Amino acid sequence: KSLFDSADLTRMVRPLVKKTIIKKRRAKFFRQDSDRRITVKPSWRKPKGIDSPVRRRFKGYPLMPSIGYGSNKKTRHLLPNGLKKFIVYNVKDVELLLMHNRSFVAEIAHNVSVRKRTQIIERAGQLSVTVTNASAKFR
């Protein structure tokens, strides 16, 4: 019997309150001239030139990020299932989520070994804690 066949792991824990997540902007902010030059990467950097039309916020030029694009405080960091992510390194960390399994899901850290992963997944199933990447690193 596989570790993933148990019915405990497949059932999803429902969040206490399911709020609809509304993003003010879905498109990413790209760096000025990143579409024209290979050396300029698209990751956002604030334009600092004195004549920069992006910095001066001219019509027809790319938008700059500002505080107004921020997410709602109540829905910030929420996953689509309505729960927040908690990174887990060992079995002891999973037990912290015992009373909070309706508001947090466990995500096993990338540097955890396969042996510890199996222990974490097993314990999470007993405590009915959802693990987002339960099938990672298993071949």
Image (cartoon, rainbow, N blue to C red):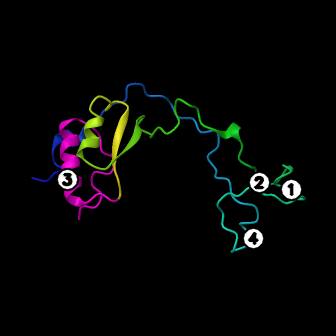
- N-terminal of the pair, mark 1 or mark 2, is 1
Task: Please give the name of the residue rendered at 20% of the width and 41% of the height, measured from the top-left corner.
Answer: 125
Residue furthest out toward the top: 17
Q: Taking 51 as reference, is 120 left or right?
A: left
Q: Is residue 127 magenta?
A: yes
Q: Which residue is mark 3?
A: 118
* Residue 113 seen: yes
Residue that carries the numbered disc 2 in the rendered image: 62
Nearer to us of marks 3 and 1 is 3
Which tag, 3 or 2, sits closer to the chain's start?
2
Q: From what the image shows, is residue 37 above or below residue 2?
A: below
Stretch of the chain drawn in magenta: 111-139
Q: Residues within 10 Å of mark 2 (few under 14, many from 20)?
A: some
Closer to the N terminus: mark 4 or mark 1?
A: 4
Q: Nearer the viewer, mark 1 or mark 2?
A: 1
Instruction: Please provide percent x and percent y for residue 37.
Output: 73, 73
Question: Residue at 53% of width from left, 36% of height from top?
Answer: 76
Tell me whether circle 1 and circle 2 mark residues in contact (CB < 8 Å): no
Residue 41 bears which disc, if any? none
Q: CA distance from mark 3 to mark 2?
A: 47 Å
Numbered disc in front, either 3 or 4: 3
Instruction: Quote the CA–CA distance across marks 3 and 4.
Output: 48 Å
Q: In the image, is residue 88 part of the stretch drawn in magenta?
A: no
Q: Which mark is residue 36?
A: 4
Q: Earlier in the sequence, mark 2 or mark 4?
A: 4
The residue type indicated by label 3 comes to: Thr
Give the farthest residue toward the left: 1
Q: Secondary structure at mark 4?
A: loop
Asked if residue 12 can be seen in this view, the reply is: no
Quickly name the residue at label 1. 53
The spot of residue 29 in percent (x, y) is 68, 53
